[in-house]
Image (cartoon, grey):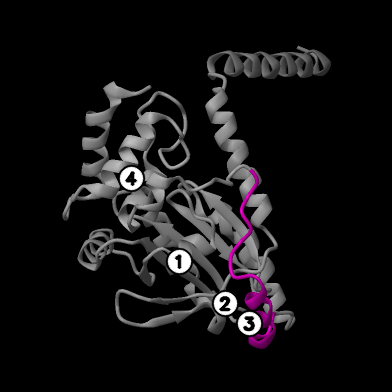
Amino acid sequence: MTKPLLYVAITLAGIGLGIFHYKLKPAPSDKDLREYAQTMSGGAAWRNQIAPDFELKTTSGEDFKLSENVGKKIIVLNFFATWCGPCREEMPELNRYFNDHKSESFLLVGIDSEEKQDRVDGFLKDLKIDFPAGIDDGPIQKQYGVTAFPTTVLIGVDGKVQFYESGALANADVAFSNLLAKNRQLMDAGQVISPQDYRQLAQKQTALPVAKGQEKSTSDEEAKLDSRGTRIVARMDCPCGCEKKVQICTCNTSKKIKTALASEDYKDQPDDEIVKSLNKRFCSGAM
């Protein structure tokens, strides 16, 4: 076979293989496209915003203040919950990356969502997590617009959000390494934000702006929820059959779920057990 014919054959084979994979690979659903678009638009909206300042006590008893670390380190915040399956799945990858790069002025801080310390301690011990973590009672999540777990935020040495992603990270190198290299260059060149400048800017921006499409009004039922109820409605799919979370759904089913969470005593039941019982109880009464 001559070289021209060989090139033609290779090209045709490549095209055929591409068509074969296209036919086999299922097209994304409308829901997949909407969720992907919302994630991307939210991340874009929050990039280059000054990271809100906060304080957090770690499970080991140490105090972490963002304002004392910005400009000195590249900081990654990982918002998680022990009941969250994707959170558990990504933790070993995050821990590996932290251990590989902690000597490069890289710091990863885990922020749990309003759970009891013994539960969080058991979770971290079970997964052999080395990076510091603390428990947020709700304010930090609100500052960073966290509505889903896991959510990961990278704060550069300029004090700005450079990466914002909701959903589990499969490859931390892909997510962080380019940004880590760029921020290291800024540090070497002395182009970092000073603590004084960061504090002044952070005082003006106490929370990240609400991303388009995430605005919502608070219903009477939701206004009565405690921190656990608020957390549950934010993560629970409404059993009415729609694609919304209970928190933003306005159907009768979501209202009944919020009323139950606000008025009934679930004692020390884990969140996932409460969600299961609510689904079983209200799925047949959707309207």
Say whether residue 153 is left or right of residue 124: right
Q: At numbered mark 3, what does the secondary structure look like: helix, strand or loop?
A: helix
Q: Which numbered disc, 3 or 2, marks the residue closer to the eye?
A: 3
Q: At numbered mark 1, what does the secondary structure look like: helix, strand or loop?
A: helix
Mark 4: which amino acid?
Gly
Q: Which residues, given as a range, are shown in magenta?
A: 193-212
Q: Who's the residue at 31% across and 54% down the image? A: 228
Alpha carbon of mark 2 to alpha carbon of mark 1: how far?
A: 23 Å
Alpha carbon of mark 2 to alpha carbon of mark 4: how far?
A: 29 Å
Q: Mark 4 points at which residue?
A: 85
Alpha carbon of mark 3 to alpha carbon of mark 2: how far?
A: 16 Å
Of the residues under marks 1 and 3, which one precedes in the sequence? Answer: 1
Q: Position of residue 282 (x, y in %)?
A: 27, 29
Q: Name the residue under label 1.
A: 139
Q: Where is residue 103 in the image (x, y as percent from the top left)?
A: 50, 77
Q: At numbered mark 4, what does the secondary structure look like: helix, strand or loop?
A: helix
Q: Which numbered disc, 2 or 1, marks the residue closer to the eye?
A: 1
The label number, if any, that marks residue 73 in the structure image: 2
Of the residues under marks 2 and 4, which one precedes in the sequence? Answer: 2
Q: Which numbered disc, 2 or 4, marks the residue closer to the eye?
A: 4
Instruction: Give yes or no for contact between labels 3 and 2 (Cβ–Cβ under 8 Å).
Output: no
Q: Give the answer, above or below, for where 253 lies relative to 154.
A: above
Q: Give the answer, above or below, for where 48 lies relative to 83.
A: below
